[in-house]
Image (tube, grey):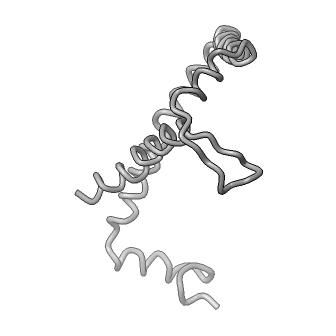
Amino acid sequence: MPALVIVLVLTRIPFALTIWYSLQRRNLLGPGQKDFAGLDNLRAAFGDDMSWGAIKNVGLLRVNRLSEQPVLSIIMITSWRWTPFAMLTLLVGLQALPDDQLKAATSSCRTCGPSSN
């Protein structure tokens, strides 16, 4: 249950706030001024030719990079996907070590552990 709360707090609430903020009309020069704009902001963003040009440029740039170096792209995608899992597995393994092993490891090192001065 605590993990579910953490996931909701770190993912769903910021997403909902992003949607809410996109429906607001805010002036960054006068932070206290805000109105409810509804879908006017989205209409303005998607009705602008510069926005569509930027979206096309970013999409084409990604496709070109993937097609130029496919092996590097596969390495990057695989690393991006599995590195967090590997780090979590390593963290859980380190946290599961018994205290006597941790004390033995830190006692054999002069600069390790809380007793180093």
Estimate the x, y position of residue 82 in percent, counting from the top left. 46, 36
**Residue name at image x 62 percent, y 81 percent:** 111
Q: State whether residue 1 is above or below residue 60.
A: below
Query: Along the horizontal axis of the image, is 1 left or right of 72?
Result: left
Q: Residue placed at 66% from the left, 17% from the top?
A: 55
Residue in the image at 62% along x and 18% along y: 46
Depth check: give the residue in front, 29 or 108.
29
Residue at 32%, 73% in the rendered image: 98
State the image quarter where residue 77 is shown: top right
Q: How many marks?
A: 0
Compared across the picture, whether 62 is left or right of 35 comes to right
Q: Position of residue 53 (x, y in %)?
A: 73, 13
Q: Quadrant of residue 48?
A: top right
Q: Is residue 49 left or right of residue 36?
A: right
Q: Is residue 60 above or below residue 40?
A: above
Quadrant where the N terminus is found in the figure = bottom left
Q: Is residue 71 above or below residue 101?
A: above
